[in-house]
């Protein structure tokens, strides 16, 4: 088996027209639980007891733009980026710091590096290091 730096699929992203309506639908119809909600940019994270989280993002995509479809957690984000670049994978935006969250204890946690990359069909993917943001 080939060495892998990817630990797991951490999330799937689903663009929605109405965040509140979609939250109600995923929770009521499929049994998801709300894990995080960020009303300032109309995004929420829902999850089941196991498996990847689902990011529900309310957005109006401009023609020719795309949304992330799968997020990967990497054991070593810098090595993964280097390996993908060496293999000629199309790399998009590289973010050295992807923001911050406030933990339950009131501490501020800086979320580390992430980057976009694309599969051969042009699907936008993202890789990020381990954090408490996606559990």
Image (tube, rainbow, N blue to C red):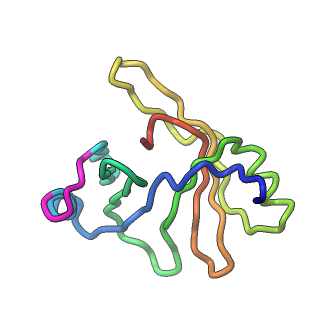
Q: Toward the viewer: 130 or 15?
A: 130
Residue furthest to the front: 1
Q: Toward the viewer: 24 or 7?
A: 7
Residue furthest to the right: 86
- Relative placement, left or right, of 54 versus 2 is left
Rendered position, 87 above or below 114: below
Residue at the image position 81 percent from the left and 52 percent from the top: 82
- Relative placement, left or right, of 99 versus 44 is right
Quadrant in the picture for residue 72: bottom right
What is the quadrant of the N terminus in the image? bottom right
Residue 60 place in picture, x, y as percent: 36, 70
Residue 21 place in picture, x, y as percent: 16, 63
Residue 107 place in picture, x, y as percent: 42, 19
Q: Does the magenta stretch include residue 17?
A: no
Residue at the image position 61 percent from the left and 53 percent from the top: 127
Residue at the image position 29 percent from the left and 43 percent from the top: 35
Residue 121 place in picture, x, y as percent: 63, 81
Per the rendered image, the range of residues in magenta is 28-34
- Relative placement, left or right, of 73 versus 132 is right
The tally of labels here is 0
Q: Does the magenta stretch include residue 29?
A: yes
Rendered position, 134 above or below 59: above
Quadrant in the picture for residue 38: top left
Residue at the image position 31 percent from the left and 62 percent from the top: 58
What is the quadrant of the C terminus in the image? top left
Quadrant in the picture for residue 12: bottom left
């Amino acid at each position: 088996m080939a060495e892998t730096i990817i630990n797991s699929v951490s999330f799937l992203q689903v663009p929605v027209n109405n965040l509140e309506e979609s939250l109600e639908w995923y929770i009521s119809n499929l049994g998801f639980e709300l894990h995080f909600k960020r009303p300032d940019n109309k995004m929420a994270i829902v999850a089941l007891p196991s498996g990847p989280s689902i990011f529900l993002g309310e957005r109006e995509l401009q023609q020719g733009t795309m949304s992330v479809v799968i997020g990967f957690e990497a054991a070593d984000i810098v090595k993964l980026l280097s390996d993908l670049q060496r293999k000629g994978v199309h790399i998009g935006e590289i973010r050295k710091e992807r923001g911050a969250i406030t933990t339950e204890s009131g501490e501020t946690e800086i979320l580390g590096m992430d980057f976009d990359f694309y599969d051969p069909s042009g699907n936008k993917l993202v890789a990020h290091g381990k954090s408490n943001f996606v559990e």
